[in-house]
Image (cartoon, helix red, strand yellow):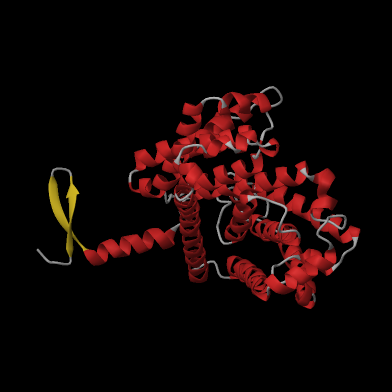
Amino acid sequence: MNPNDAPVRTGSRVRTEPIDRRLARAVQRVTGAALGPYQAAVVRIGFSAAWLLFLLREFPHRHELYGPDGPWSWDMGQQLIANNHAFTVLMWSDGVLWFETVYALAVLSSVLLLIGWRTRTMSVLFMVGVLSLQNRSIFMGDGGDNVIHLMAIYLVLTRCSQVWSVDARRAARPGPVRDPLGPVMWVVLALGLVAASLFIGRTGEPWLLVLLWLVWAAQGVWWLVCRYAPGQPRILADVLANLVHNATLVVIMAEVCLIYATAGWYKIQGSRWQDGTALYYPLKLDYFTPWPLLSDVLAASGVMVMVLTYGTVIVQVAFPFTLFNRRVKNVLLVVMMLEHAGIALLLGLPFFSLAMIAADAVFLPTVFLIWLGTRVRRGRDRLLAGSRRIPQRQRDASEEPGPRTLVG
C-alpha cells in the first residue's frame, strides 16, 4: 500500500484513497459553501434580539446610561477614549439630538438584522451601534455585553442570511432580481464613512474605520461582479466569502469554548466554589434577587446549593472536551442552556443569559434546527390559515433542507 493512501471503508470492503484526493475534498468542502447556515442564522437572530430587547428595556433610562445625563460625562468619555482608543460615534457631539439619532439607528439596525433585511449592511450598522453605546460608558454592563461586543464584530464577516431571512426569501424568487435601493444605500454609507474619517480623532481606534472602508469596497466589488461578471469572477468572490465565513464561524466556536474554559478554571481556584457555597451569596443579594421568596427557598437547601455550585464548574470545564463526542456535547449543551435560563430567572440577568444562549446555539445540531424551523413555520401557517390559505407546494418547498453545515 502506498504510504500516501488512506483506508476508506465502503460496505464490507476496505479500499484506499489517496491523501491528495482527501485533501482536495476537504478544500472543496471549505470553499464550496458557507458551512453552518442554520447555526449562523440562529446566532444572528439571538444576538440582535438580545441587544434589541436591552435597548427597549432601557429606553426610559437611555440618557442616564449612555447619554448626556449619565454620571460618566462627555468630557470623561473623551478622556477615556483618548487612552483606550475605543470606537464610538457618540464622541462626535455631546448634543441630545445626535445621541437620540444614534440610539434610534441602533434600535432600527437590530430589528432589520433580526429579520435579515440587507443583512450585510445591517450587520455593519449593528456593530457600529453596539460599539458606540457600549464604549461610551464602559461601566454600564455585564458579561453579556462583552459577548455581544465581540459577536457584533464577528457577524460582519459571516454569511448569516442564507436561511431564515428576508434576503433569503428575496434571493429565492425566480427571475432576475432588481435592486435599485442597494446602490443608493452604498452611496449613503460612503458619505457616512467620509464623515467618520473626518472625526477619526474623536471616534477612537482607526483600525475599525479601515475595516469599515474595506467592507464598503467589498460590497461595491460584489455588486459589480454579480452584475457584469457572473462567471469565474463570481465563483472566486463566492470562494473568498465562504472562506471568511467558515473561518469566522470557527473563531466563534473557539470564543465560546474559551469563555467557558476560563470561567470554569477560574471558579476552581475560588474557595467558595471549592467548598460548594458560591451560589448561596448572590441569592442573598438584593440586586440579584428579583424573586426573593424563590431565592430564599433555594438558598435554604444546602444540598441543592452545593449540587448547583459544583455542577456549574463541572459543566463549564468539561464542555470544550465534549466537542469530540456529538451525543455528549448535545446533552451538555441542553444543560448549559437550562443553566442560563435559571440564571435569568433566579438572578435577574435575562440579557446576559440570552446572549450566552445565542452563543451556545452555534453548536446546536443542524437536524434539530431544521426541525425547529419547520415547527415554527407550520405554527405561522396555522395562524395565517384564517386569512389566506397557503398552497401545499409552497409549504413543502419552504421545508427543504438548506446548504451544507459545519456542525452536526
Foreground pick, 210 / 387: 210
Foreground pick, 1 / 278: 278
Q: Position of residue 113 (x, y in %)?
A: 67, 50
The image quadrant where one finds the N terminus is bottom left
Residue 368 visible (yes or no): no
Residue 73 visible (yes or no): yes
- Residue 66: image quadrant is bottom right
Q: Position of residue 358 (x, y in %)?
A: 56, 45
Q: What residue appears at the point 52 percent right and 25 percent down from the top-left corner?
A: 301
Q: How many marks?
A: 0
Foreground pick, 355 / 6: 355
- Residue 87: image quadrant is bottom right
Foreground pick, 342 / 31: 342
Q: Is residue 147 left or right of residue 202?
A: left
Q: Position of residue 218 (x, y in %)?
A: 61, 70
Q: What residue appears at the point 63 percent right and 57 percent down from the top-left corner?
A: 149
Q: What residue appears at the point 17 percent right and 63 percent down from the top-left corner?
A: 5
- Position above or below: 116 against 340: below
Farthest residue, direction left:
1
Q: What residue appears at the point 67 percent right and 33 percent down from the top-left corner?
A: 289
Q: Position of residue 332 (x, y in %)?
A: 42, 38
Q: Is residue 15 left or right of residue 398?
A: left
Q: Is residue 357 left or right of residue 123?
A: left
Q: Is residue 86 left or right of residue 3?
A: right
The image quadrant where one finds the C terminus is top left
